[in-house]
Amino acid sequence: AAEILFGSSLVEELTAYDSDVKTSKYLYLEVINNPFLKAKLLYQEPRQKLCEKVKLNVSSFGSVASSMINGKAQHQPLTMAIQSFVAREGHIEDSYENLKKMALLPIHMNYQFEAIEKMVQNLEALKEVGQTMRR
């Protein structure tokens, strides 16, 4: 049995079964009536899991950092890959700009084609006017 003190009430009879916490009807009623206690019990398990995950991530980061510091041969391929990527990044940006320009080419060619069609129609009209003037 454990004692939990929240506000003015003292709740007893908290029993544990394996990893699940079973509560008595008194504790259940106290949880229902006390929103702070309800929230605390609701978020206690996820908080513990989050702490464990943070601990694992910090540990993993430490091991990666120590392996990079201690083993130059281990991180040399990674360094070369990063340098290669950085060197190609400029080419990637240039290629992207060229693709944007190429996307505009069909639009401009269409405008030019329409202008040529109008000129041909005007030329035919001028040709007819010239023929009527010759008669």
Image (cartoon, rainbow, N blue to C red):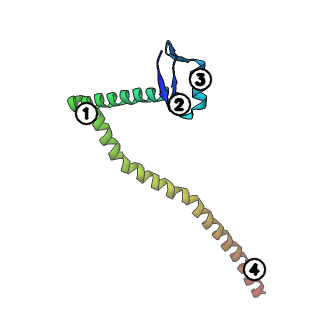
C-alpha distance separating marks 4 and 2: 96 Å
Q: Which residue is mark 1?
A: 76
Question: Residue 60, how many percent across, how many down?
Answer: 33, 28
Q: Disc 4 residue type?
A: Glu
Q: Residue at x 41, y 53 (%)?
A: 94
Cβ atoms under marks 3 and 2 closer than 8 Å: no
Q: CA distance from mark 2 to mark 1?
A: 53 Å
- Badge 1: residue crowd in 10 Å (few <14, some 14–19, many ≥20): few
Residue 42 in the image: state x and y as whole percent.
Answer: 54, 29
| Mark 3 or mark 2, earlier in chain | 3
Q: CA distance from mark 1 to mark 3?
A: 59 Å
Q: Which callout, 1 or 3, points to the residue nearer the camera?
A: 3
For disc 3, the marked residue is: 28
Going by the numbered disc 1, the residue's amino acid type is Gln
Whichever of labels 4 and 1 marks the residue nearer the N terminus, that label is 1
Count of residue discs: 4
Mark linked to residue 37: 2
